[in-house]
Image (tube, grey):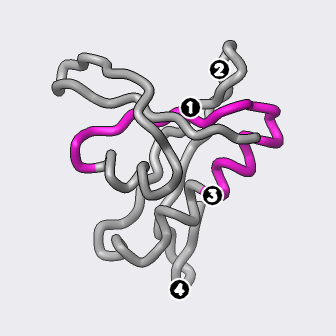
Amino acid sequence: MFEHWGALAGFAVVVPRDDGAADLDGPFVEPDLWRAGIGRKLVEEAAQFAKVLEARELVASANSRSAPFYAKCGFKPAGQLETSHGPITVMSRPLS
């Protein structure tokens, strides 16, 4: 969770997986605060938390709009999934 001027600005959720990785759900940032570095801070905090959980990598599901953001945060494409909303790219970031 990240606050800006005392109000919730964004959050991310880390979910451990059975395969030794962790899923990153989010980050979600208030639209008025996009491009202020909050999303990147949330990803870095999520990566640190995943390391505490002893995950070897952080995995994110990215649509065409979020994939460039994840790439800037060190994620690489790791596959594709078909969803009811269309295809998404699975991206991963090693945590070593």
Q: Residue at x 56, y 59 (%)?
A: 42
Residue where numbered disc 3 is placed: 44
C-alpha gap between disc 2 and disc 1: 7 Å
Q: Observer-nearest residue: 3 or 63? A: 63
Rounded to the nearest angstrom, the CA distance separating label 3 from label 4 is 20 Å
Question: Along the polypeptide, which appears first: circle 2 or circle 1?
Answer: 2
Q: Which residue is mark 4?
A: 5
Task: Examine the structure image and report whether residue 11 is included in the region drawn in magenta.
Answer: no
Q: Alpha-carbon distance for marks 4 and 1?
A: 29 Å
Q: Which residue appears at 21% of the width and 25% of the height?
A: 87
Badge 3 amino acid: Glu
Residue 65 is tagged as none
Residue under pointer 2: 17
- Earlier residue among tags 4 and 2: 4
Q: Foreground residue, 41 or 9? A: 41
Q: Nearer the viewer, residue 94 or 87?
A: 94
- Magenta-tinted stretch: 44-65
In the shown orientation, is residue 63 left or right of residue 53?
A: left
